[in-house]
Amino acid sequence: MKLNHKLIANWGAKVLSVVLALFVVLAIEFSTITNRVVTIPISVQLPPKGDYTPSSLVPTKINVVISGDEDVIYLVDPAEVHAHADFSNVSGGGIVQVPVLLEYNQNVYQRDSISLRADPSSVRILFTEVTK
C-alpha cells in the first residue's frame, strides 16, 4: 500500500492547524458562558414547636447562581425560582446542616442550556433542646 506523499507532507503544520482550530472553536463557545447571581427568599421549615428551637439566625434569603449563555440568562425571572431548606427532622441539639433545594421549571432551563445552583448549597442552624 502506497501512501500519497502530498497527504503526509508538512504533517506538523497540518496537525497544528487542526489543534488551533479546535482551540478557537472552544474558546468562542466557552467565552459566551457567564454567571448571573440573584438573591431570592428561602423557605425554611423548622422542627415542630416543643422539641428543638433555633439558637442562631434562620436564613431568609439565599443567592442563586444562573449559568449559561449571556444572551439567555438575563431572561430568567428570579420569581420563578423557589428555595427550600427542611429542618423538620432535627433529632438533637447542635449544628444541623441541610441542603438547599431549588424548585423551578427544569424543562425550560434545560432547553436553553441554563443551570441553576444555590450559593451556598447548604445552610446550617444551631438548635438547642427546649426545656420543659
Image (cartoon, rainbow, N blue to C red):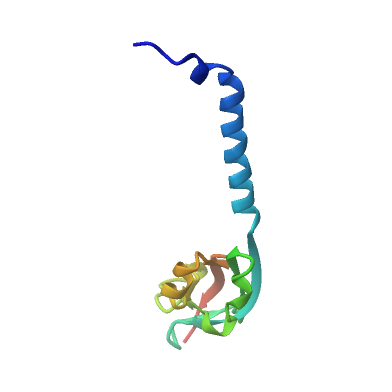
How many numbered circles does the render carry?
0
Residue 109 lies, in percent from the top left, at 48, 71
Q: Residue furthest top?
A: 2
Residue 45 visible within the image: yes
Residue 70 lies, in percent from the top left, at 64, 66
Front residue of this view, candidates 116 and 83: 116
Residue 101 lies, in percent from the top left, at 47, 72
- Residue depicted at x 61% and y 82%: 60
- Residue depicted at x 48% and y 82%: 46
| The image quarter in which residue 12 lies | top right
Front residue of this view, candidates 113 and 121: 113
Locate the N terminus and report the quarter of the image it occupies.
Answer: top left
Residue 57 visible within the image: no
| The image quarter in which residue 14 lies | top right
| The image quarter in which residue 76 lies | bottom right
Q: In the picture shown, does residue 24 fall above or below 82?
A: above
Q: Residue furthest left?
A: 1
Front residue of this view, candidates 67 and 58: 67
- Residue depicted at x 63% and y 51%: 28
- Residue depicted at x 50% and y 64%: 113
